[in-house]
Amino acid sequence: MEKLNSITANDQWDLVIEPGRSEKNYWKDLWRFRELFYILSWRDIKVRYKQTVLGAAWSILRPLLTTIIFTVVFNRIAHMENPGRAPYMLMVFAGMLPWQFFSNALSEASGSLVGNANLITKVYFPRMIIPASSVITSLVDFAISFIILLVMFIWFRFLPSWQIIFLPLFILMAFCCAFGVGLYLTAVNVKYRDFRYIIPFIIQFGLFITPIGFSSSAIAEKWRIWYSLNPMVGVIDGFRWCILGDPMNWQSFFVSLVITGIFLWLGIQYFRKMEKSFADNI
């Protein structure tokens, strides 16, 4: 008992109350709350496949059926061809992979804060963890769909290009694009709840202005730079260059890369600006 009293008397505990402390330590807090990030990501994965008829098979059927439809429409009916050496269906599926990841991540991230309202209003943690965990969860669907691509390689007896070693860089680019846009949309969705009805339209519109069912080389050269303002153009072209060895317009790619960086910066800035009011608006 005397030893315990001496330890207690010698120990001094300081409670520091400093204005703006959470702001200055925000990025450190992201690392401190990494376990919460793991928990939320794992919870989202289980919820996505819980009480579903086909489970993870949805991650296979959706891109596969869409690929078949796009191949019939653009290749069989419109008679469009792939400028590379890969079969047309492989070209479409290689473009569908990053688009599926982007659209899923955008849908999940945009409503993630509203879906975790109880957690946000009761506990402090960097709110950016929630949309980030939603985007990471979409990588699971991407990994499952990538297995189908490997099966298609065997079916078509196609050997991937050696550039496939650079694929992680383009996956990172797709993640930054989805994360940046997702941060912006989820912050807007907290303030304006009816905005969630616009998000499916944005995704549907993006599906048709993105070179998924066709090669971006079909776009006239004088319009390629403007077309590359869609950041997913560079991502999809990069995937096809890595996986299939299709020709790459590097000028258009760097335009998409810059736009991706701008979207990521704008998304983080707007999210951090609105973060203080999330608990009140939600």
Image (cartoon, grey):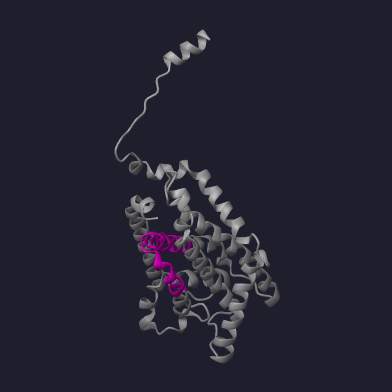
User: Which residue is at the front of the view, 74 or 14?
Assistant: 14
- Is residue 180 rendered magenta in the image? yes
* Main SS class of the magenta portion in the image: helix
- Tell me where residue 276 appears, x and y as whole percent: 34, 50
Q: On screen, 25 above or below 212?
A: above
Which image quadrant is residue 221 in? bottom left
Residue ID at (63%, 64%): 144
Please say whether residue 174 is visible from this viewpoint: yes
Residue ID at (41%, 59%): 183
Q: On screen, 158 above or below 4?
A: below
- Is residue 268 rendered magenta in the image? no
Residue ID at (39%, 79%): 224
Which image quadrant is residue 19 in? top left
- Tell me where residue 30 appears, x and y as whole percent: 44, 45
**Residue with the most extreme top position:** 2
Q: Which residues are magenta?
A: 174-203
